[in-house]
Amino acid sequence: MLQQSLLADLVTDVPAPVRLQNLVKTLRQHFHCGAVVLLKRDSDALRPIAMHGLVDEALGRRFVVAEHPRLATLLASRNPVLFEPSSSLPDPYDGLLSDQPGDALPVHDCMGISLYIEGQCWGVLTLDALQPGTFNDQSTIELQRFSLIVEAAIRVGSLEQQVRALRQNQPTSGSGNPSPNNLDNEIIGKSSALRQVISELHTVAKAELPVLLLGETGVGKELFARELHRYSKRAAKPMIYVNCAALPESLAESELFGHSKGAFSGATSERGGRFEAAHGGTLFLDEVGELPLSIQAKLLRVLQNGEVQRLGSDRHRKVDVRIVAATNRNLQQQVRDEQFRADLYHRLSVYPLPIPPLRDREDDILLLAGHFLELNRSRLGLRAIRLSATAEIALKQYRWPGNIRELEHVISRAAIKLLSAGVEHSSIATITEQELDLNLPSHASAERQVLEQTAIPASEAISLRDAVDFTQKQMIQRALALEDGKWSRAAKRLGVDSSNLHKLAGRLGIK
Ligand SMILES: Nc1ncnc2c1ncn2[C@@H]1O[C@H](COP(=O)(O)OP(=O)(O)OP(=O)(O)O)[C@@H](O)[C@H]1O
């Protein structure tokens, strides 16, 4: 039965991520599990690709293998591994199961298997069942059989990706696309706005054009610049970073173009500048809007001539450098205000690439929060750390003027607050909206309280009909809270017609 169902999933004409999602859902039903997770290996960590039964933010977590002995055990074996309910090894999903009855993950069954594609370890599949005794030796035999189908689904997905890329004449991961070389380089998120920017970035990376990254502070411009370099033909050569805001005008010229011995007092030896260091590679001019006008003129000359002259030297040196610049300023306005040279602006902005602010990428907020939670869990030596339901909503309601950098600080600060309030390292720490301490309008907070009160207690015996009503009520109130009480926008968010929403809300007693 299961085999047929899995095979049917395999041949359905849906995008690969949806197919994998369907597969884990089918496995969860068959094995009567609380959670099934498919994780892909990325250097020293495992990243969830598809999951069923975990809270949404878990998708953004990166599980460093060395810190999660169960995952390390699975990777070290080619056979299925069954962890006894009495196993003392910590579970990576402690606190993260959506149906977890209490705070801590109770004694439970857990099994998993490593997955191999073309002889290479691709990742692992894990299954957790809340009822001890759910898995036995027979389950591991079945898991081994079904893992072949999961491997086939992964393989089909990667072949489809390669075919698509061949049609678009782009390389793919199967044919040498770089993968993040460490966790710090990974761009996390799944919103359509983010996916579109990444796809554009990968395409423009191959061209030799100068790129201007635009976006508010903390949206990830530097991260995108690094990604662009890694995907460019210059990836094997250096990318040199210059923070234009931190360059004092008096030193800027020698920093960028170098100097000869004795060019100024203190120039005790000949030195090449950042342009020469970036020869063959990429020069990243961060905060380019802050560059003094005098340096703008010199920079323009180098870009026009393709050669630099070290300060105090007559010699011209050819440099082959791709310029990627970034700013959170409105450069066009600066040009109008005569603070930025129009000719330099046109040279730098051959390909302007705006990066959307976090508030326009709602689907990324919980994933990023999950990523930062796991980093803090590891850094602070906590057993588990998660968000309360209202904390999740508060994160989505907030406007994030400081974008991802601010989200990272908010999560780190909240985790430290919990510790200083006496939360034990060995317990599951839950961040509530108090620890987040976001400056939200008071009506938003009132809406969240309502949501918390309307949540169905796990122990409650409740009819399916009432559960559906509860959920609908919750979803409507949540949408209203997120849309500042605007019914038409809430209807749009929920994908229903506005008049139907009013009718349903009337029946549920919301209005
Ligand atoms: N999508 C993302 N996934 C993971 N981390 C991210 C993402 N976007 C940004 N970050 C992290 O957020 C922080 C801020 O990013 P970054 O410095 O690239 O922003 P920026 O736009 O260059 O900011 P500024 O304009 O202030 O220089 C960094 O720690 C970065 O790694």
Image (tube, helix red, strand yellow):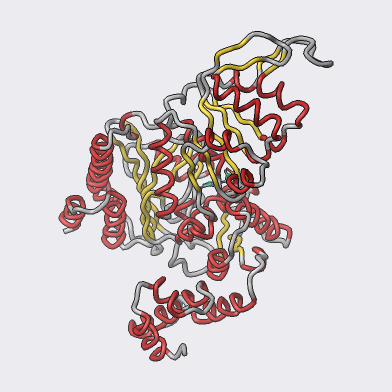
Return the x and y of residue 288 as percentages of the image width and height: 63, 37
Identify which residue, 399 or 476, lies in the foreground: 399
- Does the image show residue 17? yes
Q: Nearer the viewer, residue 85 or 195?
A: 195
Using the rendered view, name the quadrant where residue 290 is placed: top right
Q: From the image, which quarter does the N terminus lie in?
A: bottom left
When the figure is inspected, residue 170 is found, relative to residue 432, above or below; the finding is above
Q: Which residue sits at x=77%, y=13%?
A: 263
Question: Which residue is depicted at the point 53% across and 30% down?
Answer: 323
- Residue shown at the point (55%, 17%) measured from the top left: 319
Place of residue 493 in the rendered image (x, y in percent of width and height, measured from the top left): 41, 71
When the figure is inspected, residue 93 is found, relative to residue 160, above or below; the finding is below
> Residue 256 or 360: which is nearer the viewer?
256
Q: Quadrant of residue 223?
A: top right
Q: Is residue 476 above or below residue 191?
A: below
Front in this rendered view, residue 467 or 496: 496
Q: Quadrant of ligand 1?
A: top right
Please give left or right for residue 429 compared with residue 49 in the image: right
Q: Where is residue 303 in the image (x, y as percent from the top left)?
A: 56, 25
Where is residue 278 drawn, in percent x and y?
57, 22
